[in-house]
Amino acid sequence: MNALNDKIAIITGASSGIGRAAALLFAQEGAKLVVTARRQAELDTLVAEIEEIGGRAVAVAGDIREESLAEALVDTAVSRFGRLDIAFNNAGATGDMGPVPELSLATWHDTIDTNLTSAFLGAKHQVPAMLAHGGGSIVFTSSFVGHTVGFPGTGAYAAAKAGIVGLTQVLAAEFGAQGIRANAILPGGTDTPANHANLPGAAEGTRAFIEGLHGLKRLARPEEIAQSALHLASDASSFITGTALLVDGGVSITRT
């Protein structure tokens, strides 16, 4: 039996990278999906690929920082598929970077809203829908940045991702007795389109340096991170909640 047979899931940030890989994997494992990102064309392509492998998915494009989108995603899951079992709140962005004294308030708010406020808004609407049908699994994408490592220039991003871990723990404590599990994955460096700006082809030294920070001496493939999200979304992790799961290739423990 597939790991997510007949489960209903929301995946944010699904147009590329980890979110896209997770959408395809979850569909292969039997889930019916509501996927979101800002780019409608990319979402439509994703839905077509899911349908080609026999899956079912609905795309709802929008800005993850808006509460109206969080509400619409849940409403779509319930109206189209009957309930909500899983939410993978994956959308996020590093935002503008620089030393803390040089960050504008607008930059701070944008990075916090994109990463942390969007996670809060998702959970705010996902939890009641899950409670209505006996529980579910909420998975967030956090980061080792702000948890085990403080990279210069990432103040807003690190604060947002650390906040996700705190939110995860509170949700796990508040709703565990009612059947809801909440966990966060903390990926290491991942070879996604969003990270290609940090891995320019003309500067092979940059990529080699970032790879060398990891114990495995390489970057993750998005599909590898998606496998960890699948584990936390599925019943295979039925006694795991409130955890910050490092999926970081050893970047948090490497000093060589």
Image (tube, rainbow, N blue to C red):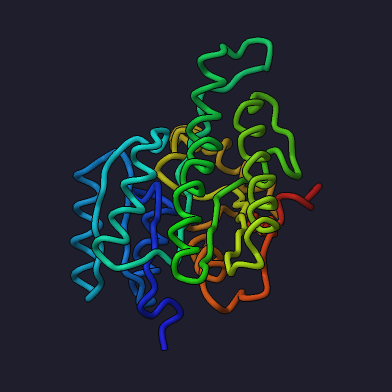
Give the total of numbered labels. 0
Residue 120 vertical placement versus 128 (above, below): above
Which of the two residues, 147 or 196, is positioned nearer the viewer here?
147
Furthest residue in direction bottom, as rendered: 1
Relative depth, front residue between 187 and 219: 187
Does residue 64 lie above or below 54 as drawn? above
Compared across the picture, whether 191 is left or right of 175 comes to left
Residue 10 vs 26, above or below: the answer is: above
Q: Is residue 51 visible?
A: yes
Task: Name the image quarter holding residue 48.
Answer: bottom left
Identified at 56% across, 37% down, the residue is 116
Q: Residue 56 location, x and y as percent?
A: 24, 68
- Percent x, y for residue 98? 61, 18
Can the viewer see residue 249 in this picture? no
Along the viewing direction, whichever of 219 and 245 lies nearer the viewer? 245
Query: Which quadrant is home to the N terminus?
Result: bottom left
List x then y, in percent, for residue 208. Answer: 59, 43
Residue at 50% x, 27% y: name it: 95
Which residue is located at x 70 percent, y 38 percent?
A: 146
Give coordinates of residue 140: x percent, y percent.
55, 52
Residue ID at (53%, 42%):
120
Q: Nearer the viewer, residue 123 or 208?
A: 123
